[in-house]
Amino acid sequence: MCPPSAAVDASEVFRVVIAILPEGRIMAAVAVSVRDAVPGGSFRRYLVRLGALRTQPGAERSAGGRRTELHLLFDQLISENCGDGELGKVCQLIHHLLNRFQVVVDEQNLNFLLSYCISALKQCSSWTHVEILQALAAVVYNNGPKCQKYLQDLLGKMGLLVQFSDPAQPDVELRRAAVHSMANLCLSVPGQPCLDEPYRSVCFQTFLSVLQSSKTSNVDDIVFCMLLQNALKGIQSLLNGGKMKIIQTDQLGSLLAVLKKCMFHGLPGLSIEMPAALYPAPLPQYDKRSPVKQEQPEPAAFKKKSKGKQKKGEFAEEGKEDSCDTGNESNHGADVLKLNLENSHCVDPRACASDVVCVPAGKDPLPSHGNSWKRISSSESEYSDAEGGIQSKMRSYQAKVRQGALACFLSAIKSIEKRVLYGYWSAFVPDAPGIGSPQSVSLMTIALKDPSPKTRACSLQVLSAILEGSKQFLSIAEDANDHKRAFTPFSVTIASSIRELHRCLLLALVAESSSQTLTQIIKCLANLVSNAPYSRLNPGLLTRVWNQIKPYICHKDVNVRVSSLTLLGAIVSAQAPLPEVQLLLQQPSSSGLNNSGSATPHRFNFSEQWRKALPLEGESPENPSGCLPPEPCWLIRLCISVIVLPREDSCSDNDANFPSGSVYEPSPVRLESLQVLALLVKGYFSMAQSYLLELGEVACKCMEEMDPSIQLHGAKLLEELGTGVVQQHKPDSAVAPEKRVPISMVVTFWTMMLNGPLPGALQNSQHATLQTSACDALSSILPEAFSSLQNDQQILCITLLLGLNHSETPLVKAAAVRALGVYILFSCLRQDVMFVADTANAILNSLHDKSPSVRAKAAWSLGNLTDTLIVNMETMGQSFQEEFSDLLLLKMLRSATEASKDKDKVKSNAVRALGNLLHFLQPCHVAHPRFREAIEESLQALVSTVESEATMKVRWNACYALGNVFKNSALPLGEAAWTTQAYGALSSVVKSCKNFKVRIKSAMALSIPSRRECYGHTEQFCHVWSALVEALQKSEDTEDFLEFKYSASLRTQICQALLHLLSLATNTDLPLIWETIKANGDAIKSYVVQYMKSGLTSPPRRLQINKKSVDRGLLNNAEWHVHNVRPTRGDSALESKGASLPHSGLRNLVHWGWGIVPTG
């Protein structure tokens, strides 16, 4: 019995509950609570009085009056029976109100209720503790951070929850209630602080010990399942949102071991015993399988076949939370999968998968003869109705444990670094079984054998999360060609795992009947396809996926159709172009589609009619879209038909979220089709180019629709088409000129766009994202096609882009200024001084925008603009330079200098622009006082950038820019003060920069000045020489292995720079050069000999020169120059060194030090 004070507290608790409950819900809530808690006895009269307090029609009673009478009623009710029984009723009332009515407890009432529950647990009889803990769990739910002052009583060393949840606690129901309260304490609302680390650790260890414990014979199965569920929810709450990071390997291994054990809890036909902890290992770890007693006798299961769909409600007691796991969703075919997965003697996994390819989607693979409990009707079962209900309820709770374990694992994946997670890959991802050994249990075991569709879907979600972002890990996979190795390389093991994943997922695909789970299977396949390295694997995997997904494109469920298209998009974008996918795209349109039971060929026929009924501009009726390939690409035709044709009756949607009266397919299906088209055009443009005009018309049609998403994806398709044409016509393109899209067709294509909805999309200020995509599309026009457009269309493009450059939307402005940066490189526009000036002003305007993304795009365009200035200077000479405004040039120089102090994304192109501008300057500019200050500032900015700790791309561009500066003979190179700073910065970088590409560019810059005077005095010249010699000796010193591949290029560039300097050296330079050669002759000799031998190799095609002749020319120039240098009369130092040289004079200095045999 409770002490007398507990009765007073109970009365106060009732008042607190009334105070926190909203006015309109008091009567119903309390009435239900009293009725449920006290179903009979003298309390019925209080229930009658409570009912009399309800507001009757026509009667008026103030809310305050009702509340007063309620307080009086509760006082009488409490005094009726003071003790533990009354305490139980109070706790039931609290639990009922907070759970069912979602009452929010303020801080004052929260403190009171917590204090009451804690004191009740300490003072009252043990048989009341379960109900008190239930009330406590309801009180602390989502209020963990607000319970700080009570945490010591609850979670301290001798805390109540710690004691009640101890593994030695004999009352399992009490332990479960304590774990439930602890789990609710760990739950917190996003944005609120979580529990302190010591309390989190206590909770985690408690939950872990619960999951590691085994069920004893005297424990009820359902209570044990609820205990496991609560522990899993607690760990999930700790992991969610990154509140707890598991760093220690033992801790992580223990968690993963218990999660894997719980994933298979109660799975029919399977029981495993896991080790205490899992460890990172390349092979599956020990998981002992225990024999499981079948729930039904085998003869009954094998005598009859499954007859149709199971009746709804056959297992009605399973509970509404898992109601989708029963009924017609249960027809899963576990027996067929077991036969295929475990007992198959098929040598080639491909053949096993192909055996089930022809099964129609959504139907059972074979007549079912399995022993699954789902397949047995009540007449066949040995259980009575009551026993069957208990078994059904137990299976439901076991399924919830498996779902909880999978949900917890999903949270764990998000809180573990991927590189750590992939150490446990073999524990959760299937691998091909060895000869005579069974299949290791994995996530795919659940996906294939679990009778609950919800659990199967959960396992696939977890597998998808593991596969997401696994491209780097899976990139090591490679199929073995040599089968006689003494060991199996890890790369071969991963390749085997990838193949097994394909096989199992395809088996699950044909066996699944639940649309929701089917969607998850296809999404998981898409994740696998996006990350697997097919170029390193034997072909055939994608072919099986491709052929098996075709029937699901016309599935009755919208989500299945969308995910099927997503998978096709993943295939066409996986390391494109792949020869295997190229062949798949050329398959006949009817291949693999006749098994779907839908009218897919009918859709293709309509696609043909649509193409023939709408001849495009400039086409002849006999050849609507140019020269068609012998076998048209069926995927392009399918996507076009989905986008533009009315929907078919056979594909009626069963999802109420999509309007049934729509003429076309649901929007998600059309959007996914547009994305597949865009990916196909991007990866396999050679397949899509024959459909260029037709796809252009599809893009036009989409941009004319009212749905903003359809408009946007239509613009993105247009951009990909334009980009594909541009890539095909590049000078270094591998496509033969006769196989490229004709310029005339490209002109027709863009004429159709500009006469269609594209200008309207560019001016649609209500849809900024569409304007952005339209700008990107307009920038993808082929330069040769642009020059062939009509004059008014060219003016339209330029006017629209210049106008959008003043947009107030950063996305639009960034896209517009980028497009202008593309147009400035067009040969037909770059020589137009007025266009160049207008574009320059627009770019400078955007360069001062407050948006970093706009400034980054503007800096890129400014770099392109200055590239154009250099090209015009070289091709048009002084005529262009004289026409270009000096004031605008000065403005560009100052803006670029200012931009070089911006963020790295802006800075990288700003320094590139500075180098070009300083190269472009003429003597009149250099002599002008206004320019002199700007030149000094810009050079200081370049030197500072080279020496800075900016990103390597920025420093690379800065070195490149200084090299451009050195090309301008009008600048006082060698005389100005900034010369020493520039050479010093480049010399420092060539010796010590961690990035070899930056070193290469700095060495190249140091070799650009063409006259000895440009290097300044002798000391500076020799400082550059010494820096290059030191850099040559350090050309193999790197901490990053990835940089080592650039070391040969670095040595080549340094040797060229040394030969260049030697060819310019004067008689005052040679003594110091000679000292360097004497000190480092052996090292220099080996590198230079290696450099000269490398001249026998062919240079890259883009150089279009003979590298050997260049190297020999540099050497000959150096030899000739040294041969003609004579010591100055009276130069005793040089004369003494010259006297010690061979009689052939200074010419042999190079050969003596480097060991190079002269050529003649």
Image (tube, helix red, strand yellow):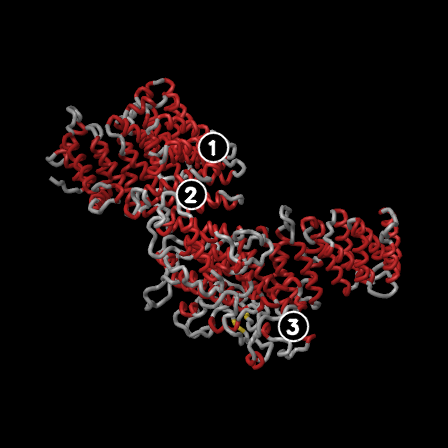
**Any part of residue 1041 in sight:** no
Measure the C-alpha gap from mark 3 to mark 1: 69 Å
**In which quadrant is the C terminus drawn?**
top left
Pointer 3: residues within 10 angstroms few (<14), some, or many (20+)?
Answer: some
Camera-nearest residue between 176 and 876: 876
Q: Which mark is residue 719?
A: 2
Camera-nearest residue between 608 and 962: 608
Measure the C-alpha gap from mark 2 to mark 1: 18 Å
Residue lying at 86% horizontally and 51% vertically, measured from the top left:
57
Name the residue type under label 3: Gln
The reply to whether the C-beta atoms of the residues labelled 3 and 1 are less than 8 Å apart is: no
The reply to whether the C-beta atoms of the residues labelled 2 and 1 are less than 8 Å apart is: no
Pointer 2: residues within 10 angstroms few (<14), some, or many (20+)?
Answer: many
Q: Closer to the observer: label 3 or label 1?
A: 1
**Relative vertical location of residue 865 with respect to residue 590 in this rendering, above or below:** above
- Find disc 3 in the rendering and name its residue: 391
N-terminal label among 2 and 1: 2
Camera-nearest residue between 749 and 838: 749
Pointer 1: residues within 10 angstroms few (<14), some, or many (20+)?
Answer: many
Measure the C-alpha gap from mark 3 to mark 2: 59 Å
Element marked by disc 2: helix
Q: Locate residue 860: give its quadrant.
A: top left
**Relative vertical location of residue 757 with respect to residue 559 in this rendering, above or below:** above
N-terminal label among 3 and 2: 3
Q: Position of residue 269 (x, y in %)?
A: 55, 73
Residue 820 placement, left or right of 421: left
**Relative vertical location of residue 466 with respect to residue 306 in this rendering, above or below:** above
Q: Position of residue 425 (x, y in %)?
A: 47, 61
Number of marks:
3
